[in-house]
Image (cartoon, helix red, strand yellow):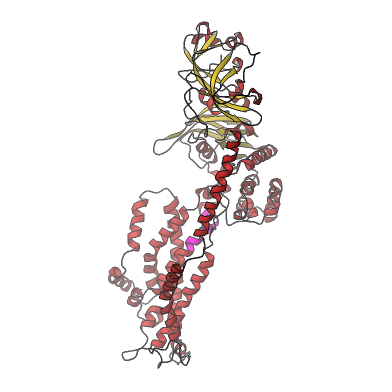
């Protein structure tokens, strides 16, 4: 009997270990089958082809744009030169990009600061009416912007904010904040509450706890909320078109739409400016990919 | 350094649940006090109240003679080790240990010196620049300890700090935590549900159940003289065998199912009140080691039972047997992992040479002088 008992654990370990490994192999970076490859290639082509077409076309001369040739012939940078003021018309695209940067960065900063504080409060602090508040936030985040354009325009006009940065920063913040609060709240709630308690015992004030202990662990959440907000501001068209008609305050999506005139459609400039405008987003995504430190919280607690 | 005094301390949650009920407890300066009890008994809540992480609903709590009811954790000069360590994952070992000192605005050189000192004590010097994610469970546990000791607090609070370690490491860290506590001489409250930890580490042990402290004593007294059936059943592994028995007139013997056990004069002298229970049911408690295998030389007090299972531990046999008496289970004290085969089951620890086999009839000598008696109605020990 003693022999049987002694053997039992080793048998179960022997049979369970390969099963675990098999599961892991299938789950992580395992070789994928041909069907999967086909699916991956189709999806990647679907996403990349328009971008490739935009990039290649931006180097085409007016004559070859719209033709069936895939590669530019000859390669030319004239579209970039005219878009960024090389033809003596002034660097309008540069101005649009600068405006977009100012609006998007300011909004993102505001959204992250307010979103973190609100998310922390809603996630961690004892408070009445949390659920209704979260529901209202969710409703606001899916509210169609077009419905409030007219009243917002009138408000902006009455307080003299038309053609200003704040005319975009404020509504962008209001529209992006609810989603950021949701993301940040969920991230902050995932951080063990013992972290804060340890902070309290160590003598840290609530703000210090948030800044030194909680936020470093919530970086993936901050990056996620940040990139969503920045992209939303960078690509927003309707409010930017409605509130800022002055060329000095136009953002890049509106600016691009204003190229050309009644009888000319400068496709080359559209493509060139769009390529440049896509760079910040592409860079951000690349940086975030590295910055969203997977397993940042691993090791903090058992598991 | 300070002592801790709890006077009629109560914790009532907003939903009306009373987690801690009028607890009185004194922890002397330098003492290692263990709070032990089944899960949900209120031990962690009590610890968190000492830490200042939970409000005190009623009663008075003093640390070093000062009432701390309304003070935050920072003002109480305590250090706490959490069950999941709660190390800051983005900080190195050195930064983790030194964080509290940094908040106190201590000069950097001083912080470095203290961190190094703590790392030396805990054998962490080699890993001082690593982050928690790169450490093993035992090392993380040491960092958590380091974070506590570097502040030189008046009181240490530990909430099941070893429960995430594997069995072997737990034994090793048990000794290490005790060694560090003795070296620093700081009053310590240590919460565990593991009675082996409680018995081996505590200067005194407080056994809790449903928010009430049942008994506070040194481990040996707790084991030898439990104040009620719950403590008797909770402390000790395998648990004490509790059976319902009937005292005969004059309390000279008791009936255990169909068997009879004579009580020597010494038992009656030690417990004069026992005579008052004559003719009534009492609960008797027998630790497994007080039921050795009977041999020819054994006197009359032998009970027989059907051997159902024999566990060979190398140095002894744990024999699970059954008799025809009613086994009593103290509510909430059933130790995890213990198997009750049926109502008359008991466990005896017998010599490996006794040769007991499942299916045979076992004979066990009853050590009547070590037998415990409990009132069947309220479960309290009959001690006098």
Q: Residue at x 38, y 61 (%)?
A: A178
Residue B108 visible here: yes
Q: Residue at x 51, y 67 (%)?
A: A289
Residue A200 included in the magenta stretch of the image: no
Relative to A87, is A131 above or below? above
Q: Nearer the viewer, residue B200 or A130?
A: B200
> Going by the image, does B35 lie left or right of B30?
left
User: Please, what is the dominant secondary structure of the magenta stretch?
Assistant: helix
Relative to A286, is B332 above or below? above
Q: Residue at x 45, y 55 (%)?
A: A120
Give the x, y percent position of residue B247.
50, 11
Q: Nearer the viewer, residue A22 or A215?
A: A22
Give the x, y percent position of residue B282.
49, 15
Relative to B209, is A110 above or below? below
Quadrant where the N terminus of chain A lies?
top right
Q: How many marks?
A: 0
Give the x, y percent position of residue A294.
53, 60
Relative to A212, is A242 above or below? below
Residue A160 visible here: no
Give the x, y percent position of residue B362.
57, 20
Residue A219 included in the magenta stretch of the image: yes
**Span shown in magenta:** A209-222
Q: Nearer the viewer, residue B83 or B33?
A: B83
Q: Nearer the viewer, residue B168 or B134?
A: B168
> Going by the image, does A124 lie left or right of A134?
right
Question: Residue B1 falls in which quadrant of the image?
Answer: top right
> Going by the image, does B367 lie left or right of A273?
right
């Amino acid at each position: 009997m003693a022999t049987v008992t002694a053997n039992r654990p080793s048998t179960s370990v022997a049979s369970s270990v390969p099963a675990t490994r098999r599961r892991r192999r299938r789950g992580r970076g395992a070789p994928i089958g041909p069907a999967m490859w086909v699916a991956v290639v189709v999806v990647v082509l679907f996403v990349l082809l328009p971008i490739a077409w935009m990039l290649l076309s931006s180097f085409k001369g007016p004559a070859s744009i719209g033709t069936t040739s895939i590669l530019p012939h000859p390669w030319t940078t004239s579209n970039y030169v005219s878009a960024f003021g090389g033809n003596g018309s002034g660097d309008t695209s540069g101005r649009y990009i600068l405006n977009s940067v100012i609006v998007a960065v300011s909004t993102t900063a505001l959204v992250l600061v307010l979103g973190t504080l609100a998310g922390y409060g809603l996630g961690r602090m004892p408070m009445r009416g949390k659920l209704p508040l979260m529901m209202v936030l969710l409703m606001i985040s899916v509210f169609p912007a077009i419905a409030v354009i007219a009243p917002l325009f009138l408000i902006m006009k009455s307080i003299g904010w038309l053609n200003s940065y704040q005319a975009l920063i404020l509504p962008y913040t209001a529209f992006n904040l609810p989603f950021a609060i949701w993301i940040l709240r969920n991230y902050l709630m995932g951080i063990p509450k013992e972290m804060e308690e340890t902070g309290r015992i160590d003598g840290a004030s609530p703000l210090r706890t948030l800044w030194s202990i909680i936020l470093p662990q919530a970086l993936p959440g901050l990056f996620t909320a940040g990139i969503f907000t920045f992209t939303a501001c960078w690509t927003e068209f309707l409010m930017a078109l409605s509130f800022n008609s002055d060329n000095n305050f136009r953002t890049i999506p509106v600016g691009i739409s204003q190229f050309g005139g009644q009888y000319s459609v400068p496709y080359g400039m559209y493509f060139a400016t769009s390529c440049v405008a896509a760079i910040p987003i592409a860079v951000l995504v690349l940086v975030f990919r590295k910055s969203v430190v997977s397993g940042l919280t691993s090791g903090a607690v058992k598991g | 350094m300070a002592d801790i005094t709890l006077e009629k301390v109560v914790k009532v949650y907003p939903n009306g649940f009373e987690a801690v009920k009028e607890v009185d407890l004194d922890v002397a300066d330098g003492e290692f006090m263990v709070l032990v009890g089944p899960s949900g008994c209120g031990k962690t809540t009590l610890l968190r109240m000492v830490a200042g992480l939970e409000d005190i609903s009623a009663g008075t709590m003093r640390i070093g003679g000062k009432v701390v009811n309304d003070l935050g954790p920072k003002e109480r000069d305590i250090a706490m080790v959490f069950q999941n360590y709660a190390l800051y994952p983005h900080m190195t070992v050195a930064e983790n240990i030194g964080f509290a000192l940094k908040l106190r605005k201590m000069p950097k050189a001083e912080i470095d010196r203290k961190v190094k000192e703590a790392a030396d004590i805990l054998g962490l010097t080699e890993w001082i620049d690593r982050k928690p994610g790169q450490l093993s469970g035992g090392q993380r546990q040491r960092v958590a300890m380091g974070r506590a000791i570097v502040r030189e607090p008046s009181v240490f609070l530990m909430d099941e700090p070893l429960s995430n370690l594997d069995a072997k490491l737990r034994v090793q860290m048990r000794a290490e935590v005790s060694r560090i506590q003795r070296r620093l001489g700081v009053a310590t409250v240590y919460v565990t549900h593991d009675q082996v930890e409680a018995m081996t580490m505590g200067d005194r042990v407080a056994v809790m159940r449903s928010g009430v402290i049942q008994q506070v004593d040194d481990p040996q007294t707790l084991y030898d003289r439990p104040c009620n059936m719950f403590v008797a059943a909770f402390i000790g592994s395998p648990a004490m065998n509790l059976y319902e028995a009937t005292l005969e007139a004059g309390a000279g013997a008791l009936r255990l199912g169909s068997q009879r056990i004579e009580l020597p004069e010494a038992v009656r002298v030690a417990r004069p009140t026992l005579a008052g229970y004559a003719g009534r049911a009492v609960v008797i408690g027998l630790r497994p080691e007080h039921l050795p295998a009977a041999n020819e030389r054994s006197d009359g007090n032998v009970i027989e039972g059907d051997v159902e299972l024999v566990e060979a531990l190398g140095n002894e046999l744990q024999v699970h047997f059954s008799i025809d008496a009613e086994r009593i289970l103290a509510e909430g004290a059933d130790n995890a992992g213990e198997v009750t085969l049926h109502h008359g089951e008991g466990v005896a620890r017998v010599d490996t040479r006794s040769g007991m086999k499942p299916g045979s009839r076992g004979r066990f000598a009853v050590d009547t002088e070590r037998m415990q008696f409990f009132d069947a109605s309220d479960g309290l020990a009959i001690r006098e």
